[in-house]
Amino acid sequence: MKLGKRFIRHYRLASLIAIIALLPLLGACSGGGSGGNASPSASSPPASSSPAASASESPSETPDAEREPVTLTVLAWFIGPNQALFDKFHEMYPWITIESNTNIDKAVVNNVIAGEKADLVFLDAGLSQWLSGDLLEELTPYIEKDPRIQGAVIQDGFMDAFKTGGKQWVLPYADIPMWVIVNKEMLHKYGLEMPGLDWTYDDFLEMAKQATDPAANDWGVSGMIDEFTNILTMANGSAPNYRYMNEDRSASLANTPAVLEDLKWSQELTTKWHVRPSDIEREKLGMQGDPVEVFLQGNSLFTLGADWYLETLKKADFEWDVLPMPVGKAKQATIHQTGLISIPKASKHKEEAFLYLSFLFSNEAQKTMIENGSGSWVQDQELHNYYAQAPVWQGKNVDAVRRSSEICCYSPDASIADLVTLVDTVNGPIASMITKGGDFSSRIPAVEAYNLKAAETRKALGW
């Protein structure tokens, strides 16, 4: 990314920190964790879940007014919309205050190793270093006796998506599905109509071709490179998981014929169909930089979106809307960017810290996420309806937002060994080749080297 581009950049010192902020960051392909069971039908709202746990289900039965004040410190690169969640939590549990420390030393784990006070941490580079240093509290015992999490209606396999080596070290702190942003003025200009929720990648390509006129500096696609291609491989069934990973997230499949074919299809948006400008053209046309900022120039039909772009999109002087990712050969898929949160073993307030993790499964927290433009991982009729009530989605294609929230797949970063190595040596160079050209089979040795290193790391950690 890049841990997904923005996701990894955040992992690598937050050069594109907005993604982690909103990541800030679960279900799975065709229905389970990131490894796949059936997801709920977008046409059938999820059944109502049991009521969210109340304050009486917090650490003890002591009345709120008699509790000793507790301040939790969270270590993170960037807080962003998570502050609204902190505020809602404090409203529900007024004796607990959450303060943030964003003065990070290259990676959050370094602050913990240095002994800084921390009760909650937003992980920024996978689990390998954390577990090798025995730095995290195992969450399984807390989860098993928490009535709110146990009572929440979630997709089968959801919790398993965040297990590593059979243990639960992390939970998500945000669910950010990605979707397609469409320029409706470009649609009208080229005589196109908004497609339905079940549009396909063939539909996507044909529409992009019709809206491309290099002589007029009009293009079908802005950006849509690595995350888009990752999603394509999942939709086509070429890779079960995000980052081109296999079923149990132990190895990259970027050296397999099916994934290589999908990489070529994505590359040909530039090299064959020319619906996306080449790097040289982008430089000449002043279309470099963030693809959504380029989209705001008004001459691109499609780009990839997520909640961290909503503030930027307010600057648009044309009408835009949202579509779900297209349907592939196997299924309809997106990627839910899910930031990982955990409790350091050295925390002096583990009970209260876990109460925050439990709170994230409440309808109050899930509504706050929806208000921020994110998704809801709890399946509940009230939450299903709430998308239409959230101000951020007024006047937009709410059904597309719901569909994006309900389809698979969730980011499996918690169980990917040597995540930074994967991003830097395998996925980063692949993303570059998508727009620059080149033979993807040349990357096979790098894929094989990563897979060997990952196997060694997993064995050493007992995964």
Image: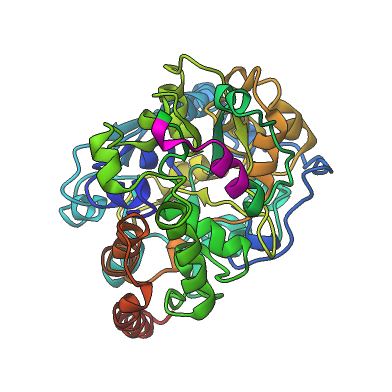
Q: Position of residue 219 (x, y in %)?
A: 45, 37
Residue 210 is inside the magenta segment: yes
Highlighted range, magenta:
204-215
Residue 2 is left or right of residue 219, and the answer is left
- The picture quadrant where one finds residue 42 is top right
Let me know if residue 298 appears in the view. yes
Q: Position of residue 76 (x, y in %)?
A: 30, 41
- The picture quadrant where one finds residue 380 is top right
Residue 105 is inside the magenta segment: no
Q: Residue at x 46, y 53 (%)?
A: 269
Closest to the observer: 350 or 198?
A: 198
253 over 182 or under it: above or below: below
Q: Residue at x 61, y 17 (%)?
A: 391
Residue 121 is left or right of residue 353, and the answer is left
Is most of the magenta stretch helix, strand or loop?
helix
92 over 129 or under it: above or below: above
Q: Residue at x 29, y 64 (%)?
A: 429
Let me know if residue 59 appears in the view. no
Residue 150 is left or right of residue 275, and the answer is right
100 over 121 or under it: above or below: above
Residue 248 is left or right of residue 129, and the answer is right
Closest to the observer: 289 or 161?
A: 289
Closest to the observer: 357 or 96?
A: 357
Q: Position of residue 396 (x, y in %)?
A: 64, 23
Q: Position of residue 259 (x, y in %)?
A: 50, 72
Please identify the quadrant where the C terminus is shown.
bottom left
Q: Residue at x 49, y 38 (%)?
A: 212
Extreme-front residue of the structure: 215
